[in-house]
Amino acid sequence: MAKKPNKPIIELKDVWKIYQMGEVKVVALSGLDLAVSKGEFVSIMGPSGSGKSTAMNMIGCLDIPTKGTIFLDGKDISQMNESDLAQIRGQKIGFIFQQFNLIPTLTALENIMLPMIFQGMPRDERMAKAKKLLKMVELDERMDHKPNELSGGQQQRVAIARSLSNDPEVILADEPTGNLDSKTGNTVMDFLKKLHKEEGKTIVMVTHDEDVAKNADRIEYLKDGKIVKVLKSGR
């Protein structure tokens, strides 16, 4: 019997995003269609200005479309208010950014514990889980170090651990190797692939680097705010 395809955990249908800049309308997304199944690893590539960041904002519940529909785990999020979007972000999505976005005054351990506070997790549980996640990214010996005491690769690994703190269903990685040398970038990609293969996480990654993109199951090419080509990865 043929394997039934997984239902999409993320689905964008004819999504448009138009920004009004004074008297000028800027079309960032122009009828974007995208579906990502549970457990998939998808890369989004495209030239500067293609709409990659806007697409990530839509998938990540950071913004709502001008028109079109977005479903996250079967729920229509396209017209939700900010407080509802924030709640869904906290529960369903983990973010990894190019700039790491760690709080400089907090230790590695405290940075990972932070998202759990907003979900009301008791302190003992937060600490135990953060320690476990630091061990997973092989940084348990650096838990008391602040970001400026860590290398770029170590900071990104802390960011990966933080993205997992609330056990999200989807991880969004925005240029996760963009600020790293190629060797360190490969190490970070190894952790993302491990999350995908061993933990079954759904990963959507924006990257301009074709070699990095090839780590995904498939590559969606974005141009002028919509998908123009889809390639299955050879890896």
Image (tube, rainbow, N blue to C red):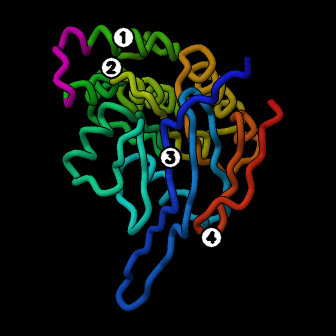
Q: Is residue 122 above or below residue 8?
A: above
Q: Earlier in the sequence, mark 4 or mark 2?
A: 2
Q: Is residue 179 left or right of residue 221?
A: left
Q: Earlier in the sequence, mark 1 or mark 3?
A: 3
Circle 2 or circle 3, nearest the eye: 3
Q: Secondary structure at mark 1?
A: helix
Callout 4 environment at 10 Å: few (<14), some (14 to 19), or many (20+)? Answer: some
Going 75% across and 38% down the picture, which residue do you hit? 214
In space, the residues marked 2 and 3 are separated at their CA atoms by 34 Å
Residue linked to disc 3: 11
Residue 151 % position (x, y): 52, 31
Q: CA distance from mark 1 to mark 3?
A: 34 Å
Identity of the residue drawn at 44% across and 31% down? 159
Is residue 50 depicted above or below 90 in this figure?
Answer: below
Mark 1, residue position: 131
Disc 1 and disc 2: Cα gap in Å?
7 Å
Amino acid type, residue under disc 3 in the picture: Glu
Left or right, residue 5 beside residue 136: right
User: As shown in the figure, which amino acid type bears the numbered disc 1?
Assistant: Lys
Quadrant position of the N terminus in the picture: top right
Please report the bounds of the magenta region as a residue range: 118-126
